[in-house]
Amino acid sequence: MSVAFAQETDYATLRVTPLTGGIGAEVTGVDLRGLSDELIADLKQAWLDYKVLFFREQDLSKAQHVAYGRALGELEIHPFTENDGEFPEIIVLHSKPDNFFAAQTWHSDVTFRECPPLGSILYGRIIPEWGGDTCFANMELAYDLLSDNLKAEIDGLNAVHSMAKTFARNMTEAQKEKAFAKYPDQVHPIVRTHPETGKRSLYANINFTMRLENRSEEESASLLRKLYEQAKLPEVQCRFHWGPGSIAQWDNRCTQHYAVPDYVGAERRVERVTLIGDRPR
C-alpha cells in the first residue's frame, strides 16, 4: 500500500510545512505568548491534520507554557513523575550526565489510565549540542498499512493496559498496592477510533499493553509483537531535532513517540504539560 503524502496547508493565522509525508508539520509565524481565539482554532485544526506540531524559538515562561496548554484543553497532573514545584501541571524530564534518562521505547503516554491523555506539549529548556531527537509515529497510517487479514484478526479485540512494566516496577509492595488501587489495569480497544476525526488507529504499545483481553501474556505475545513493529516503519515516522525554545505537540490518541538516547554525557531538560483525554473507543 502506498503512503498518502501530506500537503502544505495555509491557515488564517499560521503557516505549516509538513516534516514528512506521513506525520508532523513545523508551524511558523506564531508567537505562543499571544493567543487569540482564531489562532487557537487554527492550531487545533492543524494539530488534527498533522498529528504532531513543531515550533521553534518560542520564549515561554513556565506560566506561559501552562497558559498555552490550558487554551487547548484541561490539563492533568501526572501521578508518578517529577513535577514542577510552582506549576504541578508541568512534568520535568531532566537528564544529567550523572543521571541519564530517555524514554527510549515506542509508546503512547499513560495508557494504563481509564482516560489516557489527549496530547502533550513538550518545551525544550536545555538542549544538548547534538543528539536528543524525538521520533513520532502516525498510528493511523500504521493501521492502514496492515494487511487486510491482520485488520480482520484484530477487529473488535481489546487489550489490558497496566503500569506494571513501567511506573510500578521500582515500587515497594505497599506502594504498588496503593497505586493499583487508585489506577487499576484498564481494558482498551486494540483499534481506537479518534473522537474528533473518526479515523482508526492502532492502540497498543510496549510500555503499557500487557496482553489481549481474556488471553494470557504468552498467548498474546505473537500478535502484539506484530502490532508494536508497525511503529518502527520509517514511512509512518518523523524525527524532530530540538533547539532551545523548541516545542513538540503531539496527539496522544493516534501517535507514538520515542526519545533517542544518543546524548550520554550531556544535559537535557524538557518540560511537558498534558491535556486530559477521554476513554478510548
Image (cartoon, helix red, strand yellow):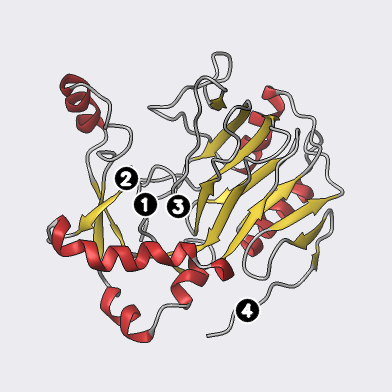
The count of marks equals 4
Q: Choose mark 3 or mark 4, whichever is in front.
A: 3
Q: Please give the label number shown on residue 279.
A: 1
Q: Residue at x 47, y 78 (%)?
A: 145
Whole-Å distance between the Cαs marked 2 and 1? 6 Å
Residue 197: x percent and y percent? 54, 67
Q: Residue at x 49, y 22 (%)?
A: 99
Residue 67: x percent and y percent? 67, 31
Q: Is residue 198 visible?
A: no
Position of 96 compared to 107: left or right? right
Depth check, front residue: 154 or 223: 223
Whole-Å distance between the Cαs marked 1 and 4? 28 Å
Q: Are marks 3 and 2 in contact (CB under 8 Å)?
A: no
The vertical placement of 229 against 166, above or below, is below
Marked residue nearer the N-terminal end (3 or 2):
3
The vertical placement of 276 against 125, above or below, is below
Residue 262: x percent and y percent? 58, 41
Position of 140 compared to 63: left or right? left
Q: Choose mark 2 or mark 4, whichever is in front.
A: 4
Query: Dot 2 corresponds to which residue?
Result: 114
- Residue type indicated by callout 3: Trp
Q: Are marks 2 and 1 in contact (CB under 8 Å)?
A: yes
Position of 65 compared to 181: left or right? right
Query: Dot 4 corresponds to which residue?
Result: 4
Q: Are marks 2 and 4 in contact (CB under 8 Å)?
A: no
Helix, strand or loop at disc 2? loop
- Residue type indicated by callout 2: Glu
Q: Please give the label number shown on residue 106.
A: 3
- Residue type indicated by callout 4: Ala
Depth check, front residue: 72 or 161: 161
- Residue type indicated by callout 1: Arg
